[in-house]
Amino acid sequence: MTAHTTESPIAEEPGVIRRFGRMLLADKFAFCAAIFLIVMILLAIVGPSWFGDIAIKQNLRGRNLPPFDWERGWIWWMGADALGRPLLARIIVATQNTLMVAAGAVVISAVVGTVLGLIAGFSSPRVNQVIMRLADVIMSFPSLLIAVIVLYLLGSSILNLMLVLAITRIPVYLRTTRAEVLEIRERMFVQAARVMGASSKRILFRHILPVVFPTLTTLATLDFAYVMLAESALSFLGIGIQPPEITWGLMISQGRQYLTNAWWLSFWPGLAIILTTMSLNLLSNWMRIAFDPVQRWRLEMRGSTNG
Amino acid sequence: MLSFIRKRAIASLISLVGLLVLVFFLSRLTGDPASLFLPVEASEEMKAQFRELHGLNDPIMVQFTRYVGDVLTGDLGQSLRKARPALDVVTEAFTWTLWLASITMSLVAGAAIVVGSLAAFRAGGFFDRLSSILSLIGASVPDFWLAIVAIVIFSVQLAWLPTSGTGTLLHWILPICVLFIRPFGIIVQVVRGSMITALSSAYVKTARAKGIRSGPIIFIHALRNAMLPVITVIGDQAASLLNGAVVIETIFGFPGVGKLMIDSILQRDFNVVLAAILVTALAIFLMNLLIDIAYALLDPRIRH
Amino acid sequence: MRKTIMLAALILGSALSPAYAASGPIKIVLPEEADLLEPCMATRSNIGRVIMQNVSETLTELDVRGDKGLMPRLAEKWEQKPDGSWRFHLRQGVTFSDGTAFDAKDVKYSFDRIMSDKNACESRRYFGGMTVNAQVVDDRTIDFNVDPVQPILPLLLSLVTIVPEGTPLEFVREPVGTGPYKLTNWTPGQQIVLTARDDYWGQKPQVTEATYLFRADPAVRAAMVQTGEADISPSISQLDATNPATDFSYLDSETVYLRIDHNIEPLNDVRVRRALNLAIDREAFIGTLVPDGALLATAIVPPPTLGWNPDVKVFPYDPEGAKKLLEEAKADGVKVETPITIIARTANFPNVTEIMEAIQSQLQEVGFKVDLKFVEVAEHEGYYSKPFKEGRGPLLVAAMHDNSKGDPSFSMFFKYASEGTQSGFSDPKVDDLIRRASAAVGDERAKLWSELIAYLHDEVVADVLLFHMVGFSRVSEKLDFKPTMATNSMLQLSEIGIK
């Protein structure tokens, strides 16, 4: 998120932080989302060192302890898992792995997909054909098979896990970008820019990318949820994260068998995923308006009346 | 258009062959089916004989040449585990998947476009907030939650619907409902985003300035312009359904291609893996072709 | 007048009903579909549960309900001749479901078919290391000459299903057998239907038709019996087994253990292996992660097996003792700090992840350095069976072994002999005991197996034996059926009563 702020041309104007801060305050949902994400990032940084020990301390007598038992310490408020470990501590510790894998996979697939899509939309029909058919191939390649092949050829590691997850998500960014490029490049203003002698690069980054960007961020935020859930399925094969390491996805799948007896085992990590996705989405909707010079007034108006 | 389709067909055929060759060689690097088919106590002789029986002892290039020869005569080989033609196994399962995917995606596309556009029309309003929250929850909820909870409520407690299986139309309701939710959540968001952009774009404003007050005309005009990313994402979601809805198949005992694919990959039943990829890839290639044609129909300026 | 007749019929009917039990169709829901219904693959559980003794019968049958031992099925009686070969006298008046009569030629053909190189019949593995020659004496007598002499041949023949002469050597998908049922419908992915035969040689079973359904999710299987969509689910999850009227637990002959690779330091040291065993609090698992009713294992075979040794005691939970042993070993220069890896298979048995995580933490508690690695089935098999990979570190492979066949010979050679495919060590005394026990009969056989079990557990400390597991099944209240140790591999419809 911060990367975009600094890249953006608006960032060069003075007082920009304050201006955006005010715009953020104007949208209460986005404001809460931002706070939530900051807390999550902080937890991801400090979680494992602060709660690492308590999250792995087993107690077979305190298995599946129900949540909301206010008598006990706050760490037990979400209940305990099948080995009697406090769920709250485990969720906090799992934040780091979860966010790292999800962000890694989403960023890799979005960047690679978008770049390839731009190239496909802009270059000769032949190159376009090659890239698009490559996308078809990836789309019809079962992700589990990619996972098994990577496992056998490259071994298991977090990086390989990100790679497998990223590869399977490339086509959607690629196809979306290309479709938009095909349409936009025929539009008046692009044609005009071209007639006026603008370089392809300039057209690409000044005119086309800004139009494609909102759709891609919507997709990317939703993919966060997908990747967090899919990652646990691959742990089944021994790729990447495995117990005793934890992620939210892994916690959900471990709680699966207890769904009807001890719902809290998979509920809390599920809630964490839902809230994270929702926050990212609200923030990206806010960004869409905040970075769009045409629509920005909406937030600024509200911001000034509020402040 | 015809020459476009012809070129496209040739390119698709080349990439399909490439895909199969890739899968053929890569999958054979991932382990030996003999030790998976036979029990752990089986002797080396039994394993060797099993490999001999299924031609797995030959050098990989010999196996490949033989496979290509068979494929050219329309024979995709036998399933190791099921002792019947791999293609039969796959087409049976894929028919179910195709039905499930097409019904679900039609419902999803229809519902998501309506809800998403309505949300965009009054962006920031109550309906927009509500539909956003619900669709985001839908997009990020683990699907087995929905499946198990649905069974507990509708089959066990209320006894309205059968828990699982196939047979009557009633059996389809739960799988479709559970499968509906995730793509619906995603597509609503994409429709909403792209409609907001379209509604604020110059020409819609021009239309309004010119005095076209009628909502529906502006709406339809904007929708048409917002459709490009929407159908792309619908295609992406449909492709993942065509690859099989594994959780749904596992929980509801639905005989689709997803679980078949996973089982064959884990058991290294190579002929079934290849046949399944061939069939699903054909479907996905065809769908992408239709999507590209749809681009051109939606926006005549797009030429291929 | 008509009313009184009807009334009389009703009274008569209800009075008679205890004697003439009801009959009717039932539905059975299983976790995994049979990929093929090949008789010679019936020892594989997903196939055997459908066809073993239902469609395809064997010459002999092991009594898993009582203690009658080996019972006649298609053979009426058998004896060992002075030269060590076996003679079987076959039942007469038996027909296959295709109408042909059963005789000694079918037995010979079935046996030769298993040994054929045109297929990969699984039951062939029970005859490894011996040459068997079947000779037809007359229509109802057959001799088996086995080299070397095989004292448990009649037991082995309880695993050989009989097909009619002329059955293709390649795998078939439509089994023909002499059993009480025949296959009438198989829609792959959906259902298999067996229907009772009118011309079955034995007693007519109460179940007239059995429909098999397949659901991978245990919660769904349990729900199906609850809603009446199925009548029996032989395996449900412990967590769903909450209704005492329908849910039964049963010892299911699966044994969970950690196979130790003795070839690699520090696991080559017996003190280290003993410390592994003392460090694990087995009792703490029972009733928590492992269901109540599971037994702590002292052998790789469960208690009703021949030669199971009641004198062998489970290792106590003694973390201090384990620490002391490790210190001793360390003082002698054994590298006890080398990280040891536990290899486990995902979804191998219920709670495998939690059980392995708990074991890991208990081992770490006494000072072991332990990594845990979960792998898929193919990779697990690579670690579990020979040839072992070169350059591997010290490994403990978590595995589950099933022996419901009543004799340890189905386990001991593979798991402990120097040549055994899953054996992690080589010990001449073990090899000798296995060889002698396999050749012995009667009490001598039981004594030798007992000796081996004690030696493996107390002297060699061959592995970390954990639990004999229990399974749970849900049976509709209108049926009369108790699952047994063999239910995992065989589900005889004729044993199911309808109330």
Image (cartoon, coloured by chain):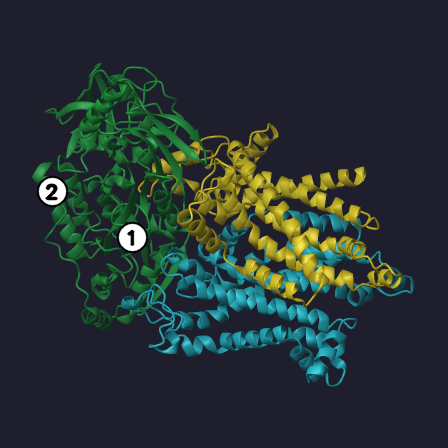
- Outermost residue toward the front? C1
Taking C260 as reference, is B65 above or below it?
above
- Judged from the image, the secondary structure of the residue bearing numbered disc 2 is helix
Q: On the rendered image, what quadrant is the C terminus of chain A found in?
A: bottom right
Identify the amino acid type marked 1: Thr
* Residue depicted at x 39% and y 37%: C213
Q: Residue furthest right?
A: A196
Q: Which comes sooner in the sequence, label 2 or label 1?
A: 1
The answer to whether one can see residue C444 in this image is: yes
Q: How many marks?
A: 2
Q: Residues within 10 Å of mark 1 (few under 14, many from 20)?
A: few
Q: Which residue is mark 2?
A: C446
Q: Nearer the viewer, mark 2 or mark 1?
A: 1
Residue C402 spot, x, y in % from top left: 27, 45
* Residue A101 placement (x, y as % from top left): 53, 65
Q: Chain of mark 1?
A: C
Q: Residues within 10 Å of mark 2 (few under 14, many from 20)?
A: many
Q: Which chain is cyan?
A: A
| Residue at 16% in and 32% down | C70
Read off the residue under disc 1.
Answer: C242
Residue C288 position (above or below residue C99): below
Task: Name chain C's colour.
Answer: green
